[in-house]
Image (spheres, rainbow, N blue to C red):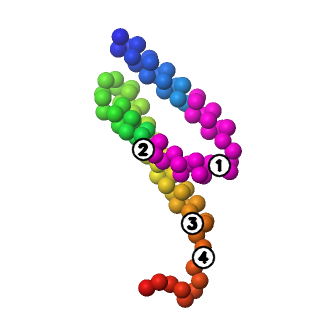
């Protein structure tokens, strides 16, 4: 029964890879930045799931994959915030010299 449960987790993991790849490749390049800034909340949920997967310690491979998922999800969240910050700076009006607030 435990090997069946492990195989189900592997199947879900592989299917998530394929579905994620298909979804990302279908997005036009002009929408990548806004979608990345909106996906930070989803990546936060991914981090929680990865921490739970790594913390259960049922199988060594699930702990390793959980830790890898935590690392990749954190890279995604930090990168998303950096891109969002950069995108918002593009829309900020340049300040005029001598108009600084005190």
Give the Cα separation between the discs numbered 3 and 2.
24 Å
In three-dimensional space, the C-alpha distance between marks 4 and 2, rounded to whole angstroms, equals 33 Å
Measuring 59% from the left and 51% from the top, which residue is drawn there? 34
Q: Helix, strand, or loop for circle 1? A: helix
Q: Earlier in the sequence, mark 4 or mark 3?
A: 3
Quadrant position of the C terminus in the picture: bottom left
Segment tinted magenta in the rendering: 18-44
Q: Is residue 50 magenta?
A: no
Q: Earlier in the sequence, mark 2 or mark 1?
A: 1
Residue picked out by circle 2: 44
Local packing at callout 2 (Cα closer than 10 Å; few below 14, some 14-19, many 20+) is some
Distance from the alpha carbon under mark 4 to that under mark 3: 10 Å
Which residue position is annotated with label 4? 94
CB within 8 Å, label 4 to label 3: no
Q: Which comes before the other along the chain, label 3 or label 1? A: 1
Vertical comparison of 91 with 62: above or below: below
Q: Position of residue 32 (x, y in %)?
A: 62, 48
User: Is residue 75 at least partly visible in the picture?
Assistant: no
Q: Secondary structure at mark 4?
A: loop
């Amino acid at each position: 029964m435990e090997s069946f449960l492990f195989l189900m987790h592997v199947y879900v993991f592989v299917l998530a890879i394929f579905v994620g790849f298909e979804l990302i490749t279908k997005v036009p390049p002009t929408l990548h930045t806004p979608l990345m800034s909106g996906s930070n909340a989803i990546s936060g949920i991914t981090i929680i799931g990865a921490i739970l997967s790594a913390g259960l310690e049922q199988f060594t491979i699930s702990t390793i994959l959980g830790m890898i998922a935590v690392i990749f999800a954190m890279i995604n969240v930090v990168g998303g915030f950096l891109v969002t910050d950069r995108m918002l700076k593009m829309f900020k009006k340049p300040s005029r010299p001598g108009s600084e607030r005190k």
